Amino acid sequence: MTVPEIIFASKYGFCGGVARALALLDEALARFGAPVYVYHKIVHNERVAADLRARGVVFVDSLDEAADVSRPLVLSAHGSSLALVAEVARRGFANVIDAVCPLVGKIHEYVRAKVAAGYDVIVIGSDAGHDEVVGTMGQAEGGIYFVSSGADIALLPPMEKVCFVSQTTLAKEVVREVAATIRARFTGAETLSEAGVCGATSERQDAVRELVVGHGLCDIIVIGSATSSNTKNLARVAMEAGATNVWLVGSAEDINFDMPARIGITAGASTPQVLIDEIVAKLNGFSD
């Protein structure tokens, strides 16, 4: 295969929230040494998780797995429920580091304030079990509802004072569509700007759309984990923009398809630069 001409999206890779979370984890490892517990994966990328495990990070899905409360505990960038935070305090962990993305933290504050003011809250998300959705839903014990599409709005009970927020990694077009349905049923429904869609997420979606429409690219590689919501959305946006072939690849070993003469590359907000470099090196190694 011939070495393809590679055109990068104008925005791709780590966002500020992911970079901050990993910096906090680096600081914890440097200060306390291994092991460092992390509740759930700190970000949704298998390469990042594997590298951190090699450095002594222990990912846990239950606080019961973090048996030594003298060791540091890092809460993931996706945000944590109030119940989890309370349980962490009850168990007496000596060093707790909250790596929540600042935007997610802002959404949590908004939800708590609105619930305290008597509002019902609608959370727009990709999946009720997504870590970020679980954290946001967990900011109140009642009066908070999950929806994933406009069709779900009709299933909600009657409500007087309504506000809504979204999972930060959703496509803004999806959020706008659901938001329109919410406003059609609940007149005067309030929200944050864009309901909380991450600016970095929107920029990366706009940039991959520009690869297809502006550069006329039919073939797009999206680098990242299949467990990452924002990465999967990049692939979907590329396809909807008109790309003929869209490959979501998690490692250089996934590059096993016929290579076109020109190809666009983007990467999810939790994709490390080292992985991007490895995949580009493999692409540049192709020859007739």
Image (tube, rainbow, N blue to C red):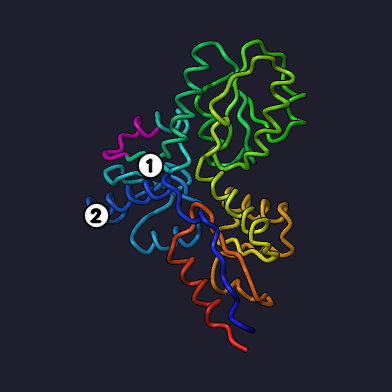
Q: Residue at x 65, y 76 (%)?
A: 261
Q: Which label belongs to residue 227?
A: none
Residue 248 shown in magenta: no
Disc 1 residue crowd, few under 14, some 14–19, many 20+, Cα 10 Å: many
**Quadrant where the C terminus is found in the figure:** bottom right
Q: Where residue 245 sits: x, y (%)?
A: 71, 65
* 63 vs 148, nearest the viewer: 148
Q: Residue furthest front?
A: 214
Label 1 is placed on what type of residue?
A: Ala
Disc 2 residue crowd, few under 14, some 14–19, many 20+, Cα 10 Å: few
- Dot 1 falls on a residue whose secondary structure is loop
Residue 33 quadrant: bottom left
Residue named by callout 1 = 99
Q: Residue at x 77, y 31 (%)?
A: 151
In the image, residue 287 above or below residue 173 = below
Q: Residue furthest left?
A: 31
**Quadrant where the N terminus is found in the figure:** bottom right
Label 2 is placed on what type of residue?
A: Ala
Q: Provide the residue span drawn in magenta.
A: 87-96
* 82 vs 161, nearest the viewer: 161
Residue 130 quadrant: top right
Residue named by callout 2 = 30
Cβ atoms at labels 1 and 2 below 8 Å apart: no
- Dot 2 falls on a residue whose secondary structure is helix
Q: Where residue 269 sits: x, y (%)?
A: 50, 52
**What's the distance in space between the residues labelled 1 and 2, CA to CA?**
16 Å
Residue 94 shown in magenta: yes
Q: Earlier in the sequence, mark 1 or mark 2?
A: 2
Q: Residue at x 74, y 20 (%)?
A: 184
In the image, residue 255 above or below residue 164 = below
Q: Where residue 80 sits: x, y (%)?
A: 46, 35
* 266 vs 212, nearest the viewer: 212
